[in-house]
Every structure is written in structure tokens, then in C-alpha cells.
Amino acid sequence: MKALAIWMLLLIAPAAHAADRVAVGIGGSASDAPLFIARDMGFFAREGLDVDLITMDSGAKVIPSLGTGELDVGSGALSVGFYNAVTRGVHFRVVADRGHTDAVSLYQTVFMRKDLVESSTFKTLADLKGRRMGFAAAGVTTLSLLNEAAKAGGISYDDVGIVYLSFPEQAAAMRNKAIDGSLLPEPQATQLERAGVGVRVMNTNDFYPNQQITCLFYSENFATARTAIAQRFMRGWLAAVRAYTAALQGGRITGPGADRIIAVIAKELHMDPEIIGAIYAAPVDPDGRLNVESIRRDLTFFQSRGWVAPGLDLAAIIDESFAAGASAALGKWQPPR
């Protein structure tokens, strides 16, 4: 009887301590690195979480899935589609930084055809006038970035030709001179530069400092009905972000712990580790802080174009309490010496 009782307890124990499942929508890109690290290096497991990273073939699919609660967490840019979903009554929260620009990393650059740069046809941002530039889709935040580039060059947004193409299509279009350039993130910029297709002209941070590129989102249900789990998720996320940040050196993953982190990212993205080590990494705030002023600037631009209705209250959708709580629990970030 005693042996039977012990056997039954062993069967019950795993169920009693089962990890809480969290469904996370991702784009399957290099900017998902901290999520890969958090799951594969055990940061989520330490918080008692079983995190399922679900690759979505389009950022637009993350929004309705968050609204219905099919996803607990999402990640991506604050596009026109995001804001218009909010105005239609889809409820979710912007909770933490997932990637921004800085002066060190060339994660996002003005990238122009090599022949234009070598011939000095393109020298400054003023030379964007009349150029055909590739963008992944209508309503993306890089259109606001283009507006800032145009202003810095003394021209207007409407002086630039906009062509909507996926990143692989942009590469082909630059090769056959159908477009002149793009505002490219990594790893596309490194890949095209190595292929001799184009040249990085400048860091976009030079004319739009610390732009909020992507964010972490919580569904309303996750934030309100599963609050304790949402708090644990944020602690695991920020712990991974700190490991990732500690490995950055000169904007690339070449610092302490880099080999293990590169191996995780390369495995998840099915990419050569050498490429992962060569590309510039997206900076992520180790305390999770968002650049709310950047978010407001992009929204104002969208509204000025008539793409988003006026009157949207950012305070109703931005919730930095989870990041602040996680940062306090982990202790304020101190860069490695």
C-alpha cells in the first residue's frame, strides 16, 4: 500500500506543478532573438512558464489573434493596422520595448544601390527626391521614418516614390534597378551588401534618434485575467534581454556569452552562425522602457496622412507597469564592465 501511495503521488506531482502555457506570436526574424533566448536558455522555464513561439506569416495576423485571446503575447511594429484595430475596438496593450535604433548599431540603415553611391548620384538625403524606395507594405512605421529622412534632406515625403515590395522582392528590384533603395533592417542589409547589390549610406538614428521600431504586446485577457503569469513572463523576457544586451559589442553579438546566444538564434532561424555574428543586432532596452515620444511621432504622421483617425488615446493602450515591475524585481540594469 505504501508503495502504491508513493507511485500515485509521483503521478500527481507533475500535474500539480505543470508550467503555465503562454502563446506568443512572432515574425520569425532576427529581432525575435530575446524570445528565442528566453525560451531556449531557460529564462521562461525559471518563471514556471511553457512558452509556445508561434510564427505568423504576417504581422497583421497577430492583431486579431491578440484581440480574441488566441495569442497571449504578440510582437511587432505599431503600424497603421495596429491603430485602426484599436479604433475598431480590439483591445490589447503595448507593454515593452522589443527593438529601437541607437547610435552604435546599424540595425536599420538607409540602403541605396551601389551604382548610385559609387557614381555620387546619391550623396545626401536630399538626393532621395525622385528616387523609388522599397517598403514592405502600406502603413508600416518605416513610412514615418521616410518622412523624417525627407525632412532632414530638406525635401517632402511626397517627393519620394514609394514601391511596396517584400524584402526578397526588394533585393531583386535593386539588382535590376527597378528601385533605388530602401530603409533596410538586418539581416537583409548585410546580405545585400555582401552580394554587392547596395551600400549602407547612414544609420537612420542619425536623423530619427531612438526610433521605436518594434514592441511587445499583451492581450487584454492576459494582462487582466492572467496578471501574475503576465508578470512572470515579463521577468523572463527582461532577464533574456539582459543576457542578450550583455553580449552586444559595437552593435553586434560579439561580447560575453555571444557564442551560446548566436547558436540559439542560428538554430531558430536556420541561418549560418557566421551571418548571425556578422549582422548588427537590434538594441532592446534592458528595463523594457518604451520611447513613447517616438510612438507618438509615428502616430501623428499616420494621422496627418489620413490613415488613422484623430483622437486615439495612446495612454489607453500603453502599459509600462509590467516592465517596471519586472525591472524592479530583477534590479535596475547595470551594463557589464
Image (cartoon, helix red, strand yellow):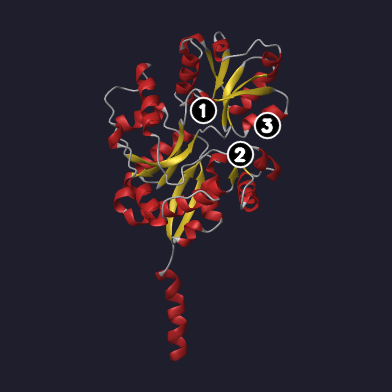
Cα distance between the residues tagged 3 and 2:
19 Å
Q: Within 10 angstroms of label 1, few (less than 14), some, or many (20 or more) residues?
A: many
Confirm or deny contact between disc 3 and disc 2 (CB under 8 A).
Answer: no
- Residue drawn at x 68%, y 40% is 275
Residue 145 location in percent, x, y? 48, 23
- Give the labeled residue for mark 3: 191
Give residue 18's quadrant in the image: bottom left
Nearer the observer, 235 or 311:
235
Q: Within 10 angstroms of label 3, few (less than 14), some, or many (20 or more) residues?
A: some
Q: Is residue 157 visible?
A: yes
Q: Which mark is residue 205?
A: 1
Kindly report which numbered mark, 3 or 2, lies closer to the viewer in this rendering: 2
Q: Is residue 108 above or below residue 48?
A: above
Q: Is residue 71 visible?
A: no
Q: Is residue 136 above or below residue 157?
A: below
Kindly report which numbered mark, 3 or 1, lies closer to the viewer in this rendering: 1
Comes first in the chain, label 3 or label 2: 3
Q: Within 10 angstroms of label 2, few (less than 14), some, or many (20 or more) residues?
A: few
Residue 125 location in percent, x, y? 55, 15
Q: Amino acid at mark 2?
A: Gly
Comes first in the chain, label 3 or label 1: 3
Q: Secondary structure at mark 3?
A: helix
- Give the labeled residue for mark 2: 250
Q: Amino acid at mark 1?
A: Asn
Cα distance between the residues tagged 3 and 1:
21 Å
Q: Secondary structure at mark 1?
A: helix
Q: Which mark is residue 161?
A: none
Comes first in the chain, label 2 or label 1: 1
- Residue drawn at x 56%, y 34% is 104
Q: Is residue 90 above or below residue 151?
A: below
Residue 300 location in percent, x, y? 35, 22
